[in-house]
Image: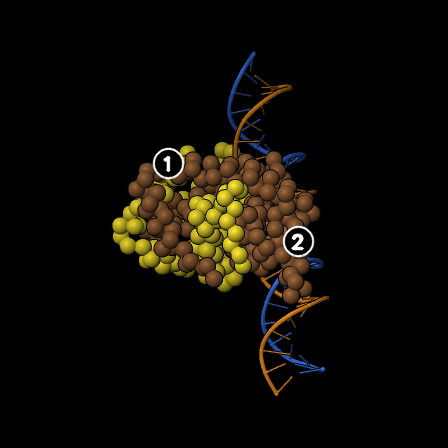
Chain colours: A yellow, B brown, C orange, D blue
Amino acid sequence: MSADHKPDHAPIELEHFLPYRLSILSNTVSQAIADDYQQRYDLSVTEWRVMAVLARFDGLSAREVAERTAMDKVAVSRALARLVEAGRVNRGTHDGDKRRSVLSLSEAGWQVHDEVAPMARAREREVLAKLDQEERAWLTRILDKLQPVRQK
Amino acid sequence: MSADHKPDHAPIELEHFLPYRLSILSNTVSQAIADDYQQRYDLSVTEWRVMAVLARFDGLSAREVAERTAMDKVAVSRALARLVEAGRVNRGTHDGDKRRSVLSLSEAGWQVHDEVAPMARAREREVLAKLDQEERAWLTRILDKLQPVRQK
DNA sequence: GCGTTATAGTTACATATGAAACCATTTGCA
DNA sequence: TGCAAATGGTTTCATATGTAACTATAACGC
């Protein structure tokens, strides 16, 4: 009820606090997309991300997938276990290195990808539609500056 | 290795995909802050958020805390259980409604708050320091437009 | 070649999180 | 009043996630 201001304690105003705002926004956006496919395809966000990189980069190892998705290797391992189990990803062994896996989308995997990708893109467009051209350009520029480009 | 482009499948480029970028950025920023206090004060992010709103709004109920933190009531309930247990939050019962709790920071709670808040603010400044004045203004404007201002 | 160290990936454990069921109290209304 | 529906909050259960330990293979130094 009463919004007591305590000047001596300088409390943080969450609604203006960048980390908090980013967290809310990120969750809202990701959740909206996930809602589209999560139950329908029995596919988690991490699994979807793995599929997305395999769609672009065929034959990656699990470690490389982890790099490209910015997920840790355990998460990738688990996502892959489910994806292989579901027949959405083919897993082979690297010729010269038996530790490495060689991953690619299966036919079924491509089918799922080709249905989910447009939905994800559509949701992104919905979000970006709230901004005008100039704002979108600034957003890209700002994200580029804030993001410690970790492309290895 | 080979970055095969599959025009017939139109894979998503994660590194340009807004939801993905937001997710990475949000995690990076939040984690950096959490690292400052997490172990040192045995305080989780959710607990810290609860403390932050109680610092500003004294006497809230658990539900009101949930509203203000955009967390669900289960998460708030758990965070409060730990905070009360640790003696950082005082929990009373509302006069006219025995279901409601009446929450406020204890002395110890204020002490923790007064140490953590400056650290959080400093981290935020570090992030924002990567942007110039104009970019910061745009960022605020963009977040305002993307965020469906859910102040009830 | 052979032992040490590094790397790819999985497993185990402990903790976090969300959904639904649940209890207590209060509200709405016949 | 008195009872059905709503609300505040907690507990339960199933699942997700992170850290550390572990297995297998490969690379390095000599």
Tag shown at residue B2: none
Q: Amino acid at mark 2?
A: Arg
User: Compared with residue A50, is residue D27 higher up or lower down, i.e. above or below?
Assistant: above
Q: Give the residue at x 41% y 55%.
A: B147
Q: Give the left or right position of residue C13, taking residue B34 as reference.
A: right
Residue found at x 39% / y 58%: A123
- As rendered, which of B40 and A97 lies closer to the eye? B40
Q: Which residue has dot 1 on it?
A: B130
Instruction: Kindly identify which residue carries mark 2.
Output: B91
- Along the horizontal axis of the image, is C29 left or right of A38? right
Sort mark 1 into few (<14), some (14-19) or many (20+) by Cα contacts within 10 Å. some
Q: Is residue B150 at least partly visible in the picture?
A: yes
**As displayed, is residue A151 above or below residue B140?**
above
Say whether mark 2 and mark 1 are on the same chain.
Answer: yes
Q: Position of residue A56 (x, y in %)?
A: 39, 47
| Circle 1: residue type | Lys
Labels 1 & 2 near each other (Cβ < 8 A): no
Quarter of the figure with the N terminus of chain B? top left
- Farthest residue in the left direction? A134
Q: Quadrant of residue B35?
A: top right
Chain letter for mark 1, please: B
10 Å crowding of disc 2: few (<14), some (14-19), many (20+): many
Of B37 and D17, nearer the camera is B37
Percent x, y for residue B135?
Answer: 32, 42
x, y percent for residue A74 = 56, 42
Q: Residue at x 46, y 55 (%)?
A: A28
Separation of residues labelled 1 and 2 (CA atoms) = 41 Å
Comparing B118 with A30, the one in front is B118
Q: Does residue C12 appear left or right of residue A25 in this picture?
A: right
User: Secondary structure under badge 2?
Assistant: strand
Mark 2 belongs to chain: B
Task: Let me know if residue B5 appears in the view.
Answer: no
